[in-house]
Amino acid sequence: MHIKKWILGAVTVFSCAMSLSARAADLLDEIIQRGTIRVAVPTDYPPFGFVGPDMKAQGLDVDMANLIGQKLGVKVELVPVTAPNRVPYLQTGKTDLTISSLGKTAERAQVIDFSIAYAPFFDAIFGAKGNPAKTHADLAGKVIAVTRGSMQDQELQDLAPKAIVQRYEDNNSTIAAFLSGQTEFFASGTPVAAALTQRNPKLDMALKVVLANSPCYIGVRKGQPKLLAKVNDIIRDAKRSGKIDELSVRWMGAPAGDLPE
């Protein structure tokens, strides 16, 4: 009796595992059958993603999500995320893709896959125009606001370990800390700073120290080669047609240029 129960249990576990494995392997097919693709996007990080006057999400990442949905022939469900949860949402199946100004790192590559790059992105330290800081060494002892879990957070740890880093849970809070004088600098991407200056031309702010050139990639759940290949095909076609440059000019003021594969 015990042997029969053990065999039945083993068969059940094996069948469930096979079912989950098959489902994981067919996410692209599932998306097509579902008729909807769930895409994680930022809503607090202009020009990549933000809430417009009509209270709808807009930005480069939102346009990219809609382009992929259009090419797949499915509706797009936008899922708002912050820097700390955009990868976990993908891992746990809350989203099918993450398009959220996501930079590629060795640590992230262990838990998710990356598409080819779809947008340029420079990380930098910003501060008052008259501030003399010019190098990573000049940041020692300086208080810098950064969004927790972002690329800039990791880069600060590596390049300016003697800086005093104040971490915030979202990008709006990071920028607000600098604007209110709580910190002397903030770390972010050049497109974000450009959008901030555009909204407030009199703002006393300038780029002080470049941290890295970190292009943006689309995050894909591990074990999804069909979906990854399809996303890459869409990006390559958009590069050839000029659509990627069009989106970059619209939201960042310049063509995307030569993006890495």
Image: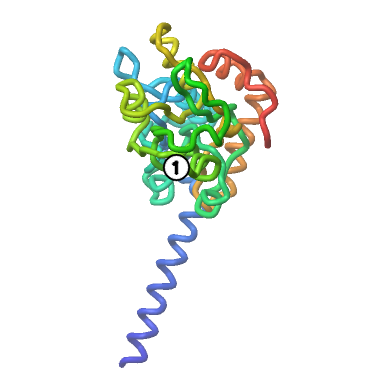
Please identify the quarter of the rendering in which residue 235 is found. Answer: top right
Outermost residue to the top: 202
Q: Can residue 30 be seen in this view?
A: yes
Residue visible at 44% across and 13% down in the picture: 197
Quadrant in which the C terminus appears: top right
Q: Which colour scheme is used?
A: rainbow
Lateral position of residue 187 relative to residue 43, left or right: right
Place residue 55 in its image quadrant. Answer: top left
Inspect the image, locate mark 1, and give the three-letter code of the amino acid beneath it. Answer: Asp
Q: Is residue 43 above or below residue 202?
A: below
Residue at position x 46%, y 33% from top?
100
Quadrant where the N terminus sits is bottom left
> Does residue 18 lie above or below 143 as drawn?
below
Q: In this view, does 195 lie above or below 34?
A: above
**Which residue lies under the disc numbered 1?**
96
Q: Can residue 43 be seen in this view?
A: no
Q: Which of 200 and 121 is in front in this view?
A: 200
Q: Where is residue 196 in the image (x, y as percent from the top left)?
A: 42, 16
Q: Position of residue 54 (x, y in %)?
A: 30, 13
Secondary structure under tag 1 reads loop
Q: Considering depth in this image, is 206 or 195 the residue closer to the camera?
A: 206
Classed neighbour count for the residue bearing mark 1: other residues with Cα under 10 Å, few (<14), some (14–19), many (≥20):
many
- From the viewer's side, name the closer residue of 121 and 8: 121
